[in-house]
Image (cartoon, grey):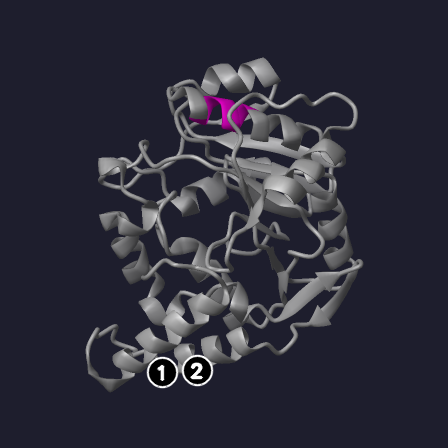
Amino acid sequence: MPLLTLFSAPKPFTDPHIRTIQRNALQSWLDLPDTEVLLVGDEPGLAETAAEFNVRLLPHLKRNEQGTPLVNSIFDLARQASQSTLVVYVNADMLFTADLVQGARAVFSQAAHFLVVGQRWDLDVRQEIDFSTGWEDRLRGQVHIQGRLHPPQGSDYFIFPRDQFSEMPPFAIGRAGWDNWMIYFACQAGWPVVDATPSILAVHQNHDYSHLPGGLPHYDQAESIQNTALAGGFVHLYNMLDTTHVLKGGQLYPASFTLARLIRHLERHLMPPDDQRHGVRWWSVRRLRRLRRRLTHNPQEM
């Protein structure tokens, strides 16, 4: 029985670039040791890809009124199909190396319940990757030269024991908010929430947003607003500055104090609980957020 079950809900394989980067991602997952891979959904081209790579497909997921797959359905299907102790949800454009498994094993040896997340490296990838011997070293070299560390505002993978997150709101996948709620929920449960950025290389293959309605980024979608409401408002949207621990050299350590973390702490406690975007508290939160994002090199405004 494998240690990890890695599962993902890919986008349609109709766009040539999306098709290329998703096939790259899938090949990198299949190269991981001690890992089973599951694909969830019935998007165009997914069944053919699963058959080509000999990967188990779970097609019968639930969708919202807009036709977008639901996160809780994806998680439930993967949990029911998996026999491994740990599961990891990954976005379908992410490349991983064997340190994903090493990191999961290290955390599991030190905690019974946990959530592992980490910042990603953004990289332009336009062609299918050569996965012959030495591909991990070649990828690391390319990331070192051309990659850019993404600010700590989004999460592209989650590692946790299979019995966790059995109850989730019906979030829309591929829209903002649900990943932030995952971190919030784990913190409220008292689990170690581990930033594995120093230990796990997570490479995001850059792409546009033509697959989304209107070509708008996920944080500008109406379904992202719905996700925020399902999460309980902005006060429940945590990020990696809210993690409690860090994984370094195979060991868990309490998260270090930084100015960005202090600002995030103040921002979180000043957030209006009713999400009202006016008044002194909201004014203060906006300015703290701008300062924090300058510190973490993120130009985006929520």
Q: Regarding mark 2 in the picture, which secondary structure is present there? A: helix
The residue that mark 1 highlights is 270
Asked whether, in this view, residue 167 is left or right of residue 225, the answer is right
Label 2–label 1 contact, CB within 8 A: yes
Does the image show residue 83? no
| Quadrant (top left, top right, bottom left, bottom right) of the C terminus | bottom left
| Image quadrant in which you'd find residue 278 | bottom left
| Left or right for 150, reference 290 | right
Q: Specify the label residue 25 is tagged with.
A: none
What x and y, as percent, mark residue 291? 41, 73
Q: Which residue is mark 2?
A: 266
Q: Position of residue 231 (x, y in %)?
A: 35, 62
Q: Nearer the viewer, residue 195 or 168?
A: 195
For this view, does 229 lie left or right of residue 108? left
Above or below 54: residue 273: below
Instruction: Give the amino acid at mark 2.
Output: Leu
In 3D space, how far apart are the residues under numbered discs 2 and 1 (Cα atoms)? Answer: 6 Å
Name the main secondary structure of what is drawn in magenta: helix
The residue depicted at 50 percent of the width and 63 percent of the height is 183
Residue 225 lies, in percent from the top left, at 26, 56
- Determine the residue positioned at 42% across, 47% down: 72
Q: What segment is highlighted magenta in the picture?
A: 18-23
Residue drawn 75% across the image and 61% down it = 248
- Near-viewer residue (218 or 286): 286
Relative to 31, is 245 above or below?
below
Q: Is residue 27 left or right of residue 219?
A: right
Say if the magenta span includes residue 165: no
Q: Quadrant of residue 37?
A: top right
Q: Quadrant of the N terminus?
A: top right
